[in-house]
Image (cartoon, rainbow, N blue to C red):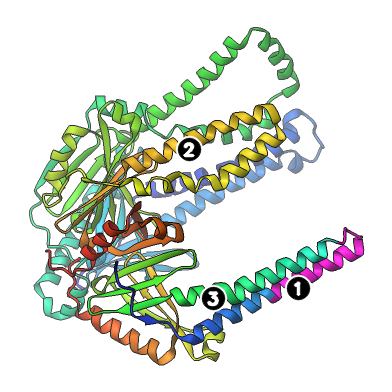
Amino acid sequence: MRAQPANRISKKGLKVWRLYGWIQTIILALVAIGGGVLVYIFEWPWWIYPIEAIVLVLFAYFMVFLFPKVRWLRWRYEVRESEIELQHGLFIVKRTLIPMVRVQHVDTSQGPILRKYKLAEISISTAATVHTIPALVVEEADELRGRISVLARVAEDDV
Amino acid sequence: MSEQQQRYKLHWITAIIEVLKTVKEAILPLLALIFVNGFQGGWKGEMTGLWYVDYLSFIIFGALIIGLAIAGIVKWRRFEYWFEDDELRIESGLFVKKKRYIPFDRIQSLDYTEGIFHRPFGLVKVKVETAGSSSQKQAEGELTAITKEAAKRVEMEMAEAKRRKKATPGLDGEEAAFEGMYEQPAEEESALRRIFTMSTKDLFVLATTSGGIGVILSGVAIFLSQFADLIPFEWMYEEISAFIKFGALIVAAAIFLGFLFVWVLSVAMTFLSHYKFTVALDKEDIIITRGLLEKKRVTVPLKRIQSVVLVENPFRKLFGYVSVSLHSAGGSIGLSSKINLFPLVKKDQVETYLQEIFPDLHLEEPAKKLTPKGRPFYYRIDFLWMVPVIGALIYFFFPYGLFSLALIPVVIAYGIWQHRSASYDVVGNQLIMRFRLFSLQTAYTMKKRIQSMEMKQSYFHKRKGVATVIANVKSGMGCYHAGVHHMDVEEAEKILNWYEKGKSAE
């Protein structure tokens, strides 16, 4: 068995994902309320209400509690001298290996929500693929970006 | 270094080619215009008295043609190219001037096409292929029609510039090292060596078994749908009811004739486009030439080739034929740049040809087969869609819906077939992966050409100890995924370990 990559992403990432989950739940709740109003106006059968409620509660449970938790527990990364290894996935665990020689450039970026939590995501691009680590503390992301770019430059290019 | 400032123009035939190109792109709206307007107006004799209403379609049509002709001429008149500062510079456009500077050392290859308009004047269309990376917007240039001497001049200018670049490596040594991928040696005397020519017999086999039939069928359908309004349906219904009395045999014959016609068309098109398909080796480049009416010449630098894929179509394999395609980095089109190296070649000869072009490539059959552990995964997932589909079919069409149960063994057999075909191997610093969609594909990839690798495992995979391995290879602007699904997890990890272990094996 290959060892799992060593580092986890920031614990705050979990909070951000939960926040995303809440936002999605609120949108769904608005849709559900709209549906409820329609049911009331057109006098559709009453059992649509409990179904809507159950769907909403299940959605909230999955998107706010279960999925972010599992995703966070799965997410691991490791930046070694000659390669980067990532592990992530909800149902399907995906492990990715990116050799330093193949790295073309590294970007960090943050949206408003990530900025509020002082987080950033880091994208590693090769000639053909882009890989993203979604939530890192800003300083860590910057440090990592610097380290990867140095390592990628040192690694001898043999393409 | 601006010693050469002379500006060149394209040949005047460019204007005509441009007009025809626009007409070809606009053919469907144009046809619609003619049919809608033409048949409503003066055509059928229902004159309204106002000449500009009766002949509206002709007026629009005429204006369009004149407009297109002017646009074509303007495009030709305003198009200029010249060489300056080791760059190919192109300027075009009337109101919005577009300037495009393409550095010579960024040019990967020049591809030539000789269409039917080019041939009488000894002209050639030159397409400039650049080595753009995935992040930057690629520069691309096309010289629609220039004389062969002019094309030679572009080539010479390019070779000259590259030689100069090589002579002064200190200038941008770091960039050159980083861009080592794109660097090309200066061209000296070209030593063209012919590797492969498709014989007329092979060409015939290729044409008759080509998969382009479906494309043409749909094309014919679209074409016919344009004429749907013209077909007098009432008359036809009577005819058809009489027709049916002749019996199913004649109907079948008519359908068959229709298919035959489409098929002959497809054969003819493949024949024309692949006529004299020749692969030659020019030191660092593969040069592919083909075509009867439209001659094409494509250059593929060996350095840019990422992966060699052997494709075995089950039907063609019956006759002992396989085909080989290449994945090359860069190129002018955004789609994956899959290049047909050998569209059709005898299986027992393919190794000789490939070895001549790629002497370092190990062309063994991948020896490692999958274990039975992974077999159920090849068809189990299909039950997710099969159960509801079959259930619905049985429910709604009760007695006959039961026939859909026959789908299950077919899907399972297909899955088992895929499982049996899949194999993989690691030879030195080269990965061989074989997998089947319908055709069997064997991807030969050097370790250094694999951009990243993935191992995927679902919960069920983990329980059975299997995993999927995917190798990501650059292809054009995009990515080609070669992968073996549902293999033993220990073996999958072995491949990852091989990939990880630096460059020690080189």
Given the image, on which type of amino acid does mark 1 rest? Leu
Residue at 14%, 64% (x, y): give it.
Answer: B160
Chain letter of mark 2 equals: B
Please, what is the three-letter code of the amino acid marked with disc 3? Pro
- Residue at label 3? A68
Q: Is residue B68 above or below residue B40?
A: below
- Tell me: B226 left or right of B217: right
Image point (48%, 38%), residue name: B411
What amino acid does circle 2 point to? Answer: Val
- Residue with the mark numbered 2: B411
Label 1: chain letter: A
Q: Indicate yes or no whether the magenta region holds residue A99.
A: no
- Residue B244, percent across and down? 67, 12
Q: Secondary structure at mark 1?
A: helix
Q: Which mark is residue A87?
A: none
Q: Which residue is mark 1?
A: A30
Of mark 1 and mark 3, the one earlier in the sequence is: 1
Residue B220 visible here: no
User: Which of these two is toward me, A112 or B415?
Assistant: B415
With respect to residue B156, does B63 lie above or below?
Answer: above
Q: Is residue B401 left or right of residue B210?
A: right
Q: Is residue B327 left or right of residue A92?
A: left
Residue B288 lies, in percent from the top left, at 23, 44
Are circles 1 and 3 on residues that touch, CB within 8 Å?
Answer: no
**Is residue B316 depicted above or below A92 in this figure?**
above
The residue that appears at 26% across and 31% down in the rendered structure is B321
Disc 1 and disc 3 on one polypeptide chain:
yes
Q: Which residues are magenta?
A: A26-46
